[in-house]
Structures are given as structure tokens and as C-alpha cells.
Amino acid sequence: MALQEELERSGSWLFRWRSYLPLALIGVVLLTMREYRYAGDSEILDHLWETACLLVSFFGLGIRIFTVGHTPKATSGRNTKGQVADTLNTTGLYSVVRHPLYLGNFFMFLGVILFVCVWWLTLMYILAFWLYYERIMFAEEAFLRKKFGDEYLTWANNTPAFIPRFRNYRGPDLPFSLKKVLKKEYHGFMAVIVTMFILEQFGEIAMSEEFHLDTHWVVLLSFGFVVWATLRILKKGTTLLNEHGR
């Protein structure tokens, strides 16, 4: 099999399992928590660092929200069975970067990795993300090139793959759909909170060798669960979040 076909085949496989394979990194993260220390050896600085990490992850979620909220049905999403694109997105964040959803994913995961305060783990994550998502992007772009031809090539030749070129920005064709965002992105919101809550508990155990629940994290986790449960019920049991064409 030629290298191009091999990259496309492996990228398609990674695309289908992209929501689950990054979980393998969680085991490495938890192992590093055995040597966890407060940022700057200060509990106050550690709280500030945790807040900063949370903001980094929510910044990534914000990129996803802005992207998904301005796209039509059957384009950007969390589909796992195969590539789907009824139209080619070229406006909004797609006018400054070809893969804004993966850029959002990068910052969401980065916040979690930074939470651990281990520099080599951050470097390991960046390398793993690059190797992992490069193949997914390759497969996705091969699909788009076959389907949209010259339209895709014109857009791709003027739009960087991953590092945004903000001077290219063009406003989105569609208005922002809050319903679509609430329907599609609530899992990511909850995943960030749960993951950091777990890391916080492992960190506290590593530092004090006893289980201790921080009130702030309990409140955040409770809030996140209420939001997640509410949106899941609305999505599965009602049509309130449905919107034609989105």
C-alpha cells in the first residue's frame, strides 16, 4: 500500500475512534500525579493555576462552540462512523484555519495537561497530539478534496491547516445557533469539569495522603452535572433543541 493510501486509511480509523483513543493518555497523567506538587509550592498559587488551566480548556471549548454554532447540518460535528460534509465550510473560523474544531480540542486537552504541572508531560502531549491529529486531518482533507474538487483546493491554498491566519477572517454565512451548540457540545463541557475534578482529588491525595473534597470543585462539579443532565434530557426526550437545517 502506498504511503498516501496508508495515511488516509489509518487517519480514517483514528477519525472513527478519535473520541476514545486520547483517554489512553489519562493513564500517563494519573501516574504523574503520584509526584504532584502545588504550583510554586503555594496553595494560593495552586488555586490560581487550576483556574488558569480551567480557562484554557474552556477557551478551547469556546472555539468549538463558535465553530459549531455557525455551521449547517451534516458538516462539523461529532460523527464517528465516517466523514460527512454536505457543504464545504469556508467562512467564520473556517476562513482563518482549516481545522478549527481540532484547534479547540488542542486547548481543551492542553488545559487538562497543564493542570498536572509537569513540563515534560506537556511536551509529550503536544507531540502526541501532532502525530495523532495529523493523520486524521490528512484523511479528512482527502475526503473533502475528492468531494469538492477545485472549490476545496482554492480554499485550502489560502487557509492554514492549524495555526490561524486572522487577517483572512470572513464573517459566517449562518447566524449563531444556540440550540445546536447546546445539543452538540454539552459532553465536552462536562468532560472538562469531571477530568479536572478527578485530577484535583488525586493531587490532594498525593499531597496530604488523605481524601479531601474542595468545596469549590464540588460546587463546580454539581453545577456541571445539572447542566449536563438537563441538556441530555432535552436532547433525548424532547424536540426543543432541534432546529431545521442546523
Image (cartoon, rainbow, N blue to C red):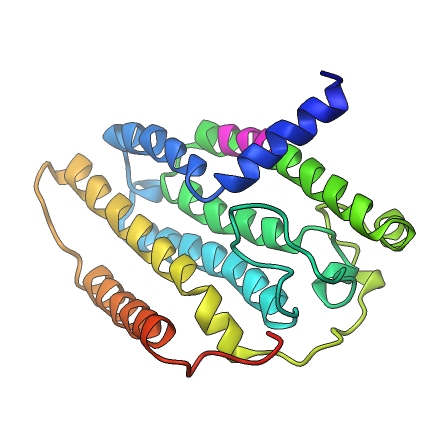
Report the front residue among 15 and 175: 15
- Locate residue 177: give its quadrant: bottom right
At 45% from the left edge and 79% from the top edge, which residue is drawn? 241
The stretch in magenta equals 124-132
Report the front residue among 35 and 109: 109
**Quadrant location of the C terminus?**
bottom right
Relative to 201, say whether 232 is above or below.
Answer: below
Relative to 134, say whether 69 is above or below.
Answer: below
Residue 222 picture location, percent across and down: 22, 67
**Quadrant location of the N terminus?**
top right
Please give left or right for residue 197 compared with residue 103 in the image.
left
At 51% from the left edge and 71% from the top edge, which residue is drawn? 181
Please give left or right for residue 200 compared with residue 150 in the image.
left
Report the front residue among 231 and 197: 231
Please give left or right for residue 70 compared with residue 90 in the image.
left
Relative to 197, say whether 17 is above or below.
Answer: above
The answer to if 121 sits in the magenta stretch is: no
Q: Residue furthest bottom?
A: 240
Residue 194 picture location, percent across and down: 29, 54
Residue 63 picture location, percent across and down: 58, 61
At 39% from the left edge and 51% from the top edge, which residue is drawn? 49
Q: Main secondary structure of the magenta part?
A: helix
Please give left or right for residue 7 compared with residue 156 in the image.
left
Q: Residue furthest top?
A: 1
